[in-house]
Amino acid sequence: MTAPALTVENLSLSISGANIVDGVSFAVAPGEVLALVGESGCGKSLTASAVMRLLPDAIRQTGGRIRLGSDDITDWPERRLRDLRGQRMSMIFQEPQAALDPLARVGAQIAESLRLPRASARPRVLRMLEDVGISDPARRIDQYPFELSGGMCQRVMIATALIARPIVLLADEPTTALDVTIQAQILDLLRRLAVERQTAVLLITHDMGVVADIADRVAVMYAGRIAETGPTEAVFARPGHPYTALLLASIPRLSDEPKSKLAVIDGRVPAPAEFGPGCRFAERCPLADARCRAETPPLLPVAGNRLAACFHAGRVA
């Protein structure tokens, strides 16, 4: 079995004493895409920030370990982390045009990760622009971000993240601001580059359609905890957690009758101050009972090489 490129063990994050990410664990192998999926506010992006060691000052890591290959980077000082970011581990952010420096040419921004003289870096930057599918790279390399479309800016971000051949790539909602056609192209590009370069990809998204398109495995988060994880096809075919089942049921399908109502999940996600001792989905779950409200369900194996944190996994349709 291939050793994981990234391992997160029992990660817990807190703000003002409340755990907003609670005991999250997962691993990503080289060449694999793991999608971390869930509603806004469930802790996906904070988990990615913790992996990059870029947490806001108000948020503390109260437990867990983070390993990059065989290195435990949990307690590394900032000086060592600066050398690691962009080299062994990189990140693609949600808004490419906001993340890029508007006053710097795109070629110079891509070359920063190489830490080479500009003349030496230029041939590699040109090849990288070709690899990410940017037409006429010899012209684009000297342009500014405002001269490029949103899709091109996202490709520049991918080129910036991958040019130093990191072993781990974190992609936080990388297609949110793009139209459907460009979104499909970007997803295909990430999938291809992950396989070709054997890069482990952690994809942060709330879009189950994106998960189906690109991910080898999926981890479903709810209110700071992992509700279910497993191979994407197995989870989509037969979810083991009621939250996963309801998420999938809410996706519009071409076979739906015109103007038919979409399925919804009743209630709302609890705030961290409202977290109780039991399952955090209990107040919205159609299968919840007294045990669910009193005890925290552990992640346990279910059919299809999956894990689900539900006492009633066998009853989920």
Image (tube, rainbow, N blue to C red):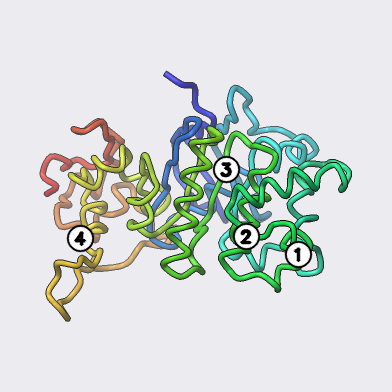
- Disc 3 and disc 2: Cα gap in Å? 24 Å
Q: Secondary structure at mark 2?
A: loop
Among numbered discs 3 and 1, the one appearing first in the sequence: 1
* Residue pointed to by mark 4: 249
* Residue pointed to by mark 1: 101
Q: Classify 10 Å Cα crowding around label 3: few (below 14), some (14-19), many (20 and above).
A: many
- The residue nearer to you, when weighing 166 against 244, is 166
Report the side of 59 relative to 115 (left or right): left
- The residue nearer to you, when weighing 295 against 168, is 168
The quarter of the picture where the N terminus appears is: top left
- The residue nearer to you, when weighing 199 against 228, is 199
Q: Check the image and report above or below for 147 versus 250.
A: below
Give the label on residue 135, or none.
2
- Disc 4 and disc 1: Cα gap in Å? 41 Å
Among numbered discs 4 and 1, the one appearing first in the sequence: 1
Give the label on residue 64, or none.
none
Among numbered discs 1 and 2, the one appearing first in the sequence: 1
- Disc 1 and disc 2: Cα gap in Å? 21 Å
Report the side of 275 relative to 89 (left or right): left
Q: Secondary structure at mark 3?
A: strand
Q: Mark 1 and 2 residues: CB-CB less than 8 Å, in contact?
A: no
Q: Given the image, on which type of amino acid does mark 3 rest?
A: Leu
Q: Given the image, on which type of amino acid does mark 4 rest?
A: Ala
Q: Residue at x 28, y 54 (%)?
A: 281
Q: Position of residue 76 (x, y in %)?
A: 71, 33
Of circles 4 and 3, which is in front? 3
- Does any portion of residue 252 appear in the rendered image? yes
Q: Mark 4 and 1 residues: CB-CB less than 8 Å, in contact?
A: no
Q: Given the image, on which type of amino acid does mark 2 rest?
A: Ser
Q: Given the image, on which type of amino acid does mark 1 rest?
A: Asp
* Residue pointed to by mark 3: 169
